[in-house]
Amino acid sequence: MQFYVARLLMDTSVLQFYPTLFVLATDVMDMLGDMVWERIKRKAEFAEDGTPICSLSESFEASDICLDAKETCNNWFCKIGSIRELLPRIYLELAMLSCCRFLHDQPINNLNRLVMMTRGVADPLASSYCRLYMVHCAQKLPTCDRGYLISCINDIKILLMRMISEKEATHGNSSANKRLLVSLMEPTIEYIMKCIFKDASQRQVGDILVKLGLGRNESELFGKFPFVSIILHHLLKELPTEVVSSNATEILHLIESCNDYSFDQCLNYRLLGFRLGERGSQMDMINAIIDKVIQVVAQFNCLDEYLKVVDSYVDIVLQNQMDNYLDAILEGVSKRACNKEIDESELGSLQSIFSKLLAHFNNLEDIFALNHFVEILDVMYGSSRNIINMQILNIATRNGYIHDPATIQLLLEISQSLHDGIDLFNMKDNDNQQPARLISRFVQMVDYGIEMEHHLTFLVECRGAFSNIEELKETLVHSCNCLAIKAMKEAKKHISFVKSCIAFSEVTIPSISACPKQLNLYLETAEVALVCGLVSHSDGLIDSALGCLQTLDLMDGFQILIDVDGILSLIRKLCSLLVMVPGNPEQGAAFIPKSILSLVSSQSWITPKMRARILCAIISLSATLSQNKLPYNVDNIEILGNDLLFFGDSTYLQDLVSLSEFVLEELCNVIQQEPSQAARGSMALEACNCIASSFKVSPEISPICSKLMETAQLCLSSNNKYLQSTMKLLGERLPSFPAAPSIIIR
């Protein structure tokens, strides 16, 4: 059966299928070789009755093998020797190459014989894959020199040179078929070349190169000797870095002389560039190499070939500050790229070149000042363009604020191009979030200085251009609010500009889909309007914030996951802001707190615990507003605080008292509604602390605190630290409250 499997490898009629056939067939032959090896080894170690004869070590010799085992082994090789077809005979003998050790101490002699036999295989594809299998099998031998490997490469080189020199016959293989044949042979060349240079010393490398026909002796390597482009490529790939660096000029000349269809010459120029970049070389040699390469690629009409070559030398040019060569490279790219449609392969090379440029320069202005940079960028598209755009924005936003109007305009166009490449239906994907964050960061870092009108115009343009990015809308509002504060500090004459900024924020906030974010921005903008003296605008924004709270539980008919702690924090922030907001004499000072109370009662998603904390915030607000002097005011002398606006107004104080009485009653009721006993106890203590710190001692307050403490004592352990500290506080603030009341033990 193994013979018939080996015969299959004689058929190369379907070229593309041959590598697959080779893998399947050699798996079977490897299996045969392993089985024969194990059988003979067992014969050598055990007698027919199972009696142990010896135990073979890894480095056994032929003299250690018994006669019976040797005879069996010899029979196998005799059977193989009787096969008439050359290729099956070679494959089967290679499969059992390691078994030669049972007969001879030097199996390498058999290997050299097989190398010579393989020269009789006429088909180039079959013979090259046969040599590949030979190298694979030879790896199993304990010791083996590189001579047979070099012979294999030299034999393949002769085959290729013969193919290249043959004139295309009308009935024979076409040029395309020959190229296909060479491409299928390439893996065999690559693997054998790797094995040749594996663990080779520098002295051995010189000897190998001479034997490969690249010099008369080790001191005169890479001379003018005929060579094949594809073999040169894989040789150059495996050569030690120091050998490439010290012989770069000679290798360049060799590449120039190897221009056959077996391999694209441009890829050898490209590989040389990458290999030179692995290690620094003398400046004179680098200059000579780059100068020659620039001259060579200047003759290329194909953009793809041009880009592949110059891409590998860009790092060297940048590291050695060869600005004249960089200009020549970019000019060549522009000349070839700007008048044609770029394909995917060319885009990949352009992306690589631009990435290296962006990694080298720290200053964005230096990058944009490069000749032809922007016009080459404009011809890019797709994911490659997006990646470069993101790199540019990353550089732009990491070095501080951006002031230059021309740079800002160019970055805006880059951001628009990046935005056009975002998948709007999958904005939550990481691939889409990163561009959105970079665009938002760019907008945030723009600063027009005293040209604030230009800055506002820029924000308006961004709102229209990037209307699908939620994060950016938040950034626009933050930036506009900062702009309003900046204008207010500049001079009073900017009040109309400040109004424009507030109007921009008022229009932008409703377009944000997340209600909690809307609420936060409404409060921020209301505070900015208040600081700038626009009280009516501030009132309107607070009304919008309350309206946002009312619509929070349902959005577009779908229940949303509510960040309860975040909403609570924003409501507390609103209460803190109301300390500074002048009350409306017509509506009363308690109008907005009452609106919050109404909201608390009407929203089903507000839990008892959250409701209690909101009520505590209103209690603190009411207590603060009732003081003769408020703890803080707006930093604007034109805006009167409630302590001055309602000074001596008994109605104002009565409104606050009525509000407080109602809230206290509601607070006690809400605490009793909490189903969890432990949570109810903690809520009672929290409310008690709030009341004790907000109100003076009075007959009305003491019973409420006592009732709350009774609830806490019923729900919590007597060892609870919060309970103990609250009792101590009440003992200090309310003398009528016992310092150490009797504890009800559960």
Image (spheres, grey):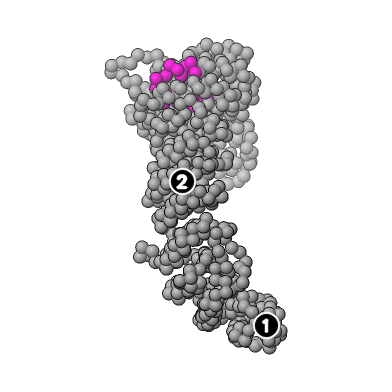
Residue 734's mark?
Answer: 1
Residue range highlighted in magenta: 294-313
N-terminal-most mark, 2 or 1: 2
- Taking depth in this image into account, of 463 and 323 the one nearest to the observer is 463
User: In the rendered structure, does residue 508 fall within the stretch colored magenta?
Assistant: no
Q: Residues within 10 Å of mark 2 (few under 14, many from 20)?
A: many
Residue shown at 49%/18% (left/top)?
A: 294
Residue 35 pos. (x, y %): 50, 40
Quarter the N terminus occupies: top left
Residue 99 pos. (x, y %): 54, 33
User: In the rendered structure, does residue 295 fall within the stretch colored magenta?
Assistant: yes
- Taking depth in this image into account, of 515 and 528 the one nearest to the observer is 528
The three-letter code of the residue at mark 1 reads Leu
Residue 571 pos. (x, y %): 51, 67
The three-letter code of the residue at mark 2 reads Leu
Residue shown at 58%/14% (left/top)?
A: 221
Image height of 462 relative to 207, above or below:
below
Quarter the C terminus occupies: bottom right
Residue 249 pos. (x, y %): 56, 16
Q: Secondary structure at mark 1?
A: loop
Taking the image as shown, residue 661 lies to the left or right of residue 263, namely right
Image height of 195 relative to 716, above or below:
above
Taking the image as shown, residue 492 lies to the left or right of residue 348, namely right
Residue shown at 39%/46% (left/top)?
A: 464
Circle 2 sits on which residue? 456
Residue shown at 60%/35% (left/top)?
A: 65
